[in-house]
Image (spheres, grey):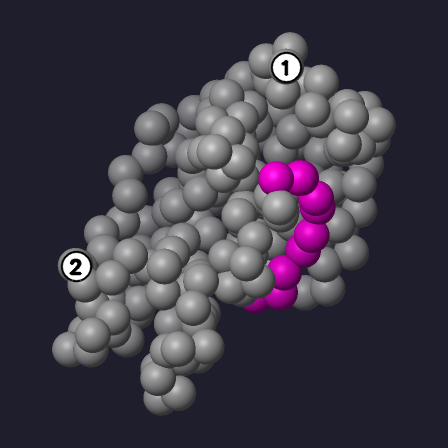
Amino acid sequence: MTQELPKLDYEYNALEPYIDAQTMEIHHSKHHQGYTDKFNAAVEGTELANKDPIEILKKLEDVPTEIKDAVRNNGGGFVNHSLFWKILTPGGKEPSDPFFGIINNTFGSMDEFKDKFTDAATKQFGSGWAWLVVKDGEMEIISTPNQDTPYSQGLTPILGLDVWEHAYYLKYQNKRPDYIKAFFNLINWEEVEKRFKDSTN
């Protein structure tokens, strides 16, 4: 099946002042569209064309050598961004009390979670992502380079932050920590919790 660019649940300017409308429009309509088109081109005419991109990325080792890099980079870009838009929402949504408790039990407190996630996002050298993932029913924080996705490591991402410069440079220039701090105002914890439950059921 040919993949299509997912529509956003909000307008390009809805995440201001934290993420500006111009960045959102370019990020979604140019970068994400580019990953979508290049992924479709990579798998066209192969047995992978009718498979779910996530399932393909979970078994990246089975992808033919001649298209493996294109699938990893562009399939990863397609899947990573599709998650990213979903876990953002204007004004953010707080976690439920039970899920807040799970975060506290896992990381010590919400503040400690933010500190550890910020550290992963800040220290990711060059382009990449910071992730909250589920492994064996437990949450942990990791980072990946480029458009590599946790799915290829046997992990389930439930929250991700794009730290490629295209995600923040128009507004924040080289101040990645300011962008990371702003991100916490936009997290849709209802969506994150849903993904956590889905991954543990």
Relative to 176, 78 lies left or right: left
Marks 2 and 1, how far apart at CA: 38 Å
Structural crowding at the residue carrying mark 2, measured as other residues with C-alpha within 10 Å and reported as few (<14), some (14–19) or many (≥20): few
The reply to whether discs 2 and 1 touch (Cβ–Cβ < 8 Å) is: no
Locate residue 133: give its quadrant: top right
Does 13 sit above or below residue 155? above
Q: Please tell me whether residue 6 belongs to the stretch shown in magenta.
A: no
Of tags 2 and 1, the one toward the viewer is: 1
Q: Which residue is drawn at 62% across and 47% down?
A: 135
In this orientation, which residue lies closer to the viewer: 66 or 147? 66
Q: Identify the secondary structure beneath mark 1.
A: helix
Question: Of 84 and 100, which appears nearest the observer?
Answer: 100
Residue 63 image point, x, y percent: 37, 78
Relative horizontal placement of residue 34, taking residue 18 as reference (left or right) = left
* Magenta-tinted stretch: 137-147
On the image, which quarter does residue 108 sit in? Answer: top right
Give the residue type at disc 2.
Answer: Met
Q: Which residue is drawn at 61% across and 39% down?
A: 137
Image quadrant containing the N terminus: bottom left
Instruction: Identify the disc placed on residue 90.
Output: none
Residue designated by label 1: 98
Residue 30 against residue 18 in the figure, above or below: below
Q: Give the residue type at disc 1.
A: Pro
In screen coordinates, is 30 left or right of 181? left
142 in magenta: yes
Q: Mark 2 points at which residue?
A: 1
Q: Image height check: is 48 above or below 24? A: below
In the picture as drawn, the residue positioned furthest to the bottom comes out as 66
